[in-house]
């Protein structure tokens, strides 16, 4: 007979515990909420009141329901009050000794049939369980932050957890409106194992001043559609908790990419624990607030302070998807555009695609007919590079082949007027290689647009060691004029987005390869647990496994990091011709 779970206990009312209490009480379960002392108890209570108060203000909860919800919670500081509960969920700080101590004490307090669950993110549930006399009733119940919002729970089964305990806790998660996935006891489980390498990498980009905190966060929200940037997410998770999770993951797997970035320790020691302390990577109006305040520490960004060069006429080289999209964006942005294709057939194709796309915009009411006509009148196609003699900016979007790009830059060097800015849209080649093919490397910059260019607002503006400050400023100003969101970074493989995204995708493949979880479970974990728009395997199938493998190889060659080596399973799928949606089969199969 399945357990009922009518009364549960929650221990620790911090970031997670207070949210977990709310989830239970909202779903009609009586809760005994325990904190270490009166002060922390008041804080926890205030958390629940504020969070449910916000739901009332947003019209998602009636005042009567809020009162009933809070009425279901008994706040206490003595664990002895847990004697009658059917389940305990522990959510105290991520320290093994503390958790073991609590489980050992609980053992003598709760009923023999009560289930004991830990919300640990990374510690061994097995090690926690053996602090009790009956490890068979111990399970992991890992909620996601914010618990009232995210609809996913990882249920962690140790080698001794009884089957019915796992089944009953999974059923309870469903009753709470959460999707449960059962996994084995490995540091980070599914979601954190994939998330924390990525978060740590973002922190190291920040620490090395590769890009600013705002640019790193904007790159991932705008470039990948993530609900939050990695540094804002670190602040939400809590830097102390994040440090402990990384530390545990590193100790278990010895993957250097999980070794906590040194600045984390410094920030935690200084008391900068994220939102809960009012300061982390960002500064908040007060502790616990999500509202960022201007702390004057914003961005030391390349190019700031320099005067941009005037740009009126822009050349685009190429006739593929990216070039066509960039021509459209430039024309709509009011620039005169001359694009260069290799044949008159190709210029005709670009013009036709441009006309079609603008026409669609008119039909959808996004562009007036007059603006369409004006945009089209600003664009001219040619097959001769020599027509770029008078442009102020060239954007190159030819094939991703270094020799081809270098030859092109050498030609542009001969053709373009002095002071013209020469930009490459390369997504994986070093910008400096293009710059070095010219006698004017200071004028060369990366302008990495995302596909489809007319839709995606993000542009990575890449400066090399040679790029002049006013060239960066020019690139940034042009992006702004185009209604794009420029982020600035140095010239390293993958820039910001791909360098953060692809190792994560690769880790997902390695997890699959290790048979820790299925493709569907992993996709679900990242979508419902982290709010990602797509799971890693869905995304890999869209990107193309061959494209992903090529980018991962580049990253591995650049950084020589063992953890970045492409997963053998990915190599095998590419060899087999399973490249994703475009071939009808990748990690998933398509009709
Ligand atoms: N922060 C996240 O995003 C997140 C997500 C999922 C799981 N977790 C896990 O949840 C657990 C709690 O993390 P958090 O972020 O909520 O931490 P937190 O620091 O925000 O809260 C911990 C709370 O536990 C209380 N506490 C400490 N000792 C106690 C004791 N002996 N008895 C009762 N209460 C005690 C503290 O006063 C504090 O309020 C950790 O295991 C963490 O790994 C965290």
Image: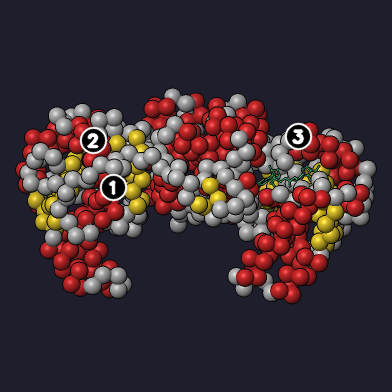
**Which is more N-terminal, label 2 or label 3?**
3
Residue at mark 3 to residue at mark 1: CA–CA distance: 48 Å
Q: Nearer the viewer, mark 3 or mark 2?
A: 2
**Which is more N-terminal, label 1 or label 2?**
2
Quickly name the residue at label 1: 476
- Looking at the image, which residue is at 76% across and 49% down? 40
Residue at mark 3 to residue at mark 2: CA–CA distance: 52 Å
User: Residue 306 at x, y = what percent?
Assistant: 25, 42
Q: Name the secondary structure under disc 1.
A: helix
On the image, which quarter does residue 158 sit in? top right
Q: Is residue 512 visible?
A: no
| Circle on res. 96 | 3
User: Residue 382 at x, y = what percent?
Assistant: 9, 51
User: Residue 35 at x, y = what percent?
Assistant: 80, 49
Vertical arrangement, residue 98 with respect to residue 532, above or below = above
Residue at mark 2 to residue at mark 1: CA–CA distance: 13 Å
Quickly name the residue at label 2: 468
Is residue 49 shown left or right of residue 346? right
Of 75 and 4, nearer the camera is 75
Q: Name the secondary structure under disc 2.
A: loop
Of 270 and 101, nearer the camera is 270
In the rendered image, the residue lying farthest to the front is 296
Q: Residues within 10 Å of mark 3 (few under 14, many from 20)?
A: some
Colour scheme of the picture: secondary structure
Cβ(mark 1) to ligand 1 < 8 Å? no
Query: Can you say which quadrant of the picture contains the N terminus?
Result: bottom right
């Amino acid at each position: 007979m399945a357990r009922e779970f009518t009364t549960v206990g929650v221990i620790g009312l911090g970031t997670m515990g207070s949210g977990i209490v709310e989830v239970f009480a909202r779903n009609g379960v009586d809760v005994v909420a325990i904190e270490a002392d009166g002060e922390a108890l008041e804080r926890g209570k205030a958390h629940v009141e504020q969070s449910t108060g916000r739901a009332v203000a947003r019209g998602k909860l009636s005042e009567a329901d809020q009162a009933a919800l809070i009425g279901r919670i008994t706040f206490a500081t003595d664990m002895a009050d847990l004697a009658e509960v059917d389940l305990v969920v522990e959510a105290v700080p991520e320290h093994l000794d503390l958790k073991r101590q609590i489980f050992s004490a609980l053992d003598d307090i709760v009923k023999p049939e009560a289930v004991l669950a830990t919300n640990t993110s990374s510690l061994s549930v097995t090690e926690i369980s053996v602090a009790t006399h009956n490890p068979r009733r111990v399970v992991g119940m890992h909620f996601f932050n914010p618990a009232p919002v995210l609809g996913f729970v990882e249920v962690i089964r140790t080698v001794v957890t009884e089957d019915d305990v796992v089944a009953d806790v999974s059923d309870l998660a469903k009753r709470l409106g959460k999707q449960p996935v059962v996994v084995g006891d490995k540091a980070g489980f599914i979601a954190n194992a994939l998330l924390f390498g990525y978060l740590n990498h973002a922190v190291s980009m920040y620490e090395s001043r590769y890009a600013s905190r705002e640019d790193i966060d904007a790159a991932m929200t705008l470039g990948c559609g993530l609900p939050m940037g990695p540094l804002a997410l670190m602040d939400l998770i809590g830097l102390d908790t994040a440090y402990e999770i990384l530390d545990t993951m590193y100790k278990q797997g010895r993957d250097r990419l999980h070794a906590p970035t040194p600045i984390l320790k410094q920030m935690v020691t200084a008391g900068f624990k994220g939102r809960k302390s009012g300061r982390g990577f960002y500064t908040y109006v007060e502790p616990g607030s999500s509202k960022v305040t201007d702390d004057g520490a914003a961005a030391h960004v390349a190019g700031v302070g320099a005067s941009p060069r005037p740009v009126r006429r822009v050349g685009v080289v190429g006739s593929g998807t990216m070039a066509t999209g960039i021509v459209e964006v430039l024309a709509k942005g009011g620039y005169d555009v001359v694009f260069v294709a290799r044949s008159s057939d190709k210029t005709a194709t670009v013009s036709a695609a441009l006309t079609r796309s603008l026409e669609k915009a008119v039909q959808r009411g996004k562009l007036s007919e007059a603006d369409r006509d004006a945009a089209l009148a600003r664009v001219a196609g040619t097959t001769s590079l020599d027509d770029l003699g008078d442009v102020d900016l060239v954007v190159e979007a030819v094939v991703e082949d270094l020799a081809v790009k270098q030859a092109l830059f050498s030609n542009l060097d001969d053709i373009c007027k002095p002071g013209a800015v020469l930009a490459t849209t390369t997504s994986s080649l070093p910008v400096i290689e293009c710059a070095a093919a010219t006698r004017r490397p200071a004028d060369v910059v990366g302008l990495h647009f995302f596909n489809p260019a007319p839709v995606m607002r993000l542009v990575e503006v890449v400066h090399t060691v040679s790029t002049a400050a006013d060239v960066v400023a020019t690139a940034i100003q042009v992006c702004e004029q185009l209604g794009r969101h420029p982020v600035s970074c140095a010239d390293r493989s993958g820039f910001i987005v791909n360098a953060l995204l692809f190792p994560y995708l690769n880790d997902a493949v390695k997890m699959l390869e290790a048979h820790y979880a299925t493709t569907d479970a992993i996709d679900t974990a990242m979508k419902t647990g982290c709010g990602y728009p797509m799971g890693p395997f869905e995304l890999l199938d869209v990107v193309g496994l061959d494209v992903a493998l090529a980018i991962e190889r580049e990253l591995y060659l650049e950084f020589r990091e063992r953890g970045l080596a492409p997963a053998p399973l990915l190599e095998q799928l590419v060899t087999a011709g399973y490249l994703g949606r475009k071939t009808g089969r990748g990690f998933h199969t398509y009709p």
